[in-house]
Every structure is written in C-alpha cells, then in structure tokens.
Image (cartoon, rainbow, N blue to C red):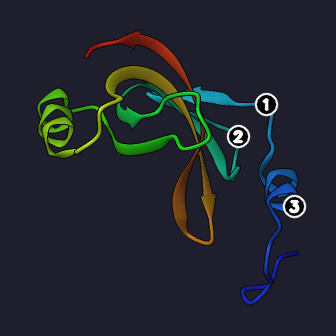
Amino acid sequence: MVKENDILKPEKVLSLLYDDELKKIGNKRYKGESKMWLAENQILVVTDIDLESEKIYYNGDNEVQAYKRYKEVQHLNKQIVRANVKMCKVRGYDFIHSFEVIERLV
C-alpha cells in the first residue's frame, strides 16, 4: 500500500497502475475500481509528437476549444489529433499514461 508521503519512482507507479483487463462502459473503459481507463476519440493539442520534449496542451472532446488552445500555443511543431487516450489516476489527479493517434486534424 502506498502512503501519502511516499515518493514514488516511475517504475513503481506503473507497476501499481498497470491493468490489461479494461472493460468498456460508455466512452470509458475500466476494471472495477481500477486506476486506469481508456477514453476513446479524444482531441489532443500536442507539440513535438513522438519526441522526448512532447507536451500535451489540451485533452477533451470539444473541437472548438482545441482550436482555441491550438492558436494560443506558441510552438512551431504543433498538431491537433484525434486519439484513444489511456488515463490513470495518481493521488487523486488524472494523468495521461499514453495515447494512440487515430487521425491528424491539423
């Protein structure tokens, strides 16, 4: 069991959260009280995709909000993509674990 004041190494977080049996309910997949789920057809504003300096500036399902955020980002290598996003919950906060690009919008 993880205590609140523990410092977690990335490999320990992944071992605590890894779950390969995901059930689909609505637009999200999860297993019981699992801390991981899959959000399908999400829109992401991403810079430097597939590089070490990759950053995600928007994650949601509203294309208008994504385009507004896209215009705000001051970066040359920015994209808007539709993706399946694997999310995890760490200490009450939602984090993006990984994503699989379905199509590139911009």
**Horizontal and vertical percent position of residue 37:** 60, 39
The residue that appears at 81% across and 51% down in the rendered structure is 14
**Horizontal and vertical percent position of residue 70:** 20, 36
For the N terminus, the image quarter is: bottom right
**Alpha carbon of mark 1 to alpha carbon of mark 2: how far?**
7 Å
Quarter assignment of residue 99 = top right
> Extreme front residue here?
76
The answer to whether residue 79 is above or below residue 87 is above
N-terminal label among 3 and 2: 3
Q: Nearer the viewer, residue 95 or 104?
A: 104
- Give, as a three-letter code, the residue at label 3: Lys
- Give, as a three-letter code, the residue at label 1: Glu
- Residue that carries the numbered disc 3 in the rendered image: 12
The answer to whether residue 14 is above or below residue 12 is above
- Give, as a three-letter code, the residue at label 2: Lys
**Horizontal and vertical percent position of residue 103:** 40, 9
Q: Are discs 1 and 2 less than 8 Å apart at CB?
A: yes
- Left or right, 24 with reference to 76: right
Q: In front: mark 3 or mark 1?
A: 3
Quarter assignment of residue 9 = bottom right
The disc at residue 21 is 1
Q: Secondary structure at mark 3?
A: helix
- Left or right, 78 with reference to 55: left
- Left or right, 22 with reference to 51: right
For the C terminus, the image quarter is: top left
The answer to whether residue 28 is above or below residue 105 is below
- Residue that carries the numbered disc 2 in the rendered image: 31
Q: Nearer the viewer, residue 56 or 63?
A: 56
Q: Are discs 3 and 1 less than 8 Å apart at CB?
A: no
The residue that appears at 80% across and 72% down in the rendered structure is 8
**Alpha carbon of mark 3 to alpha carbon of mark 2: how far?**
20 Å
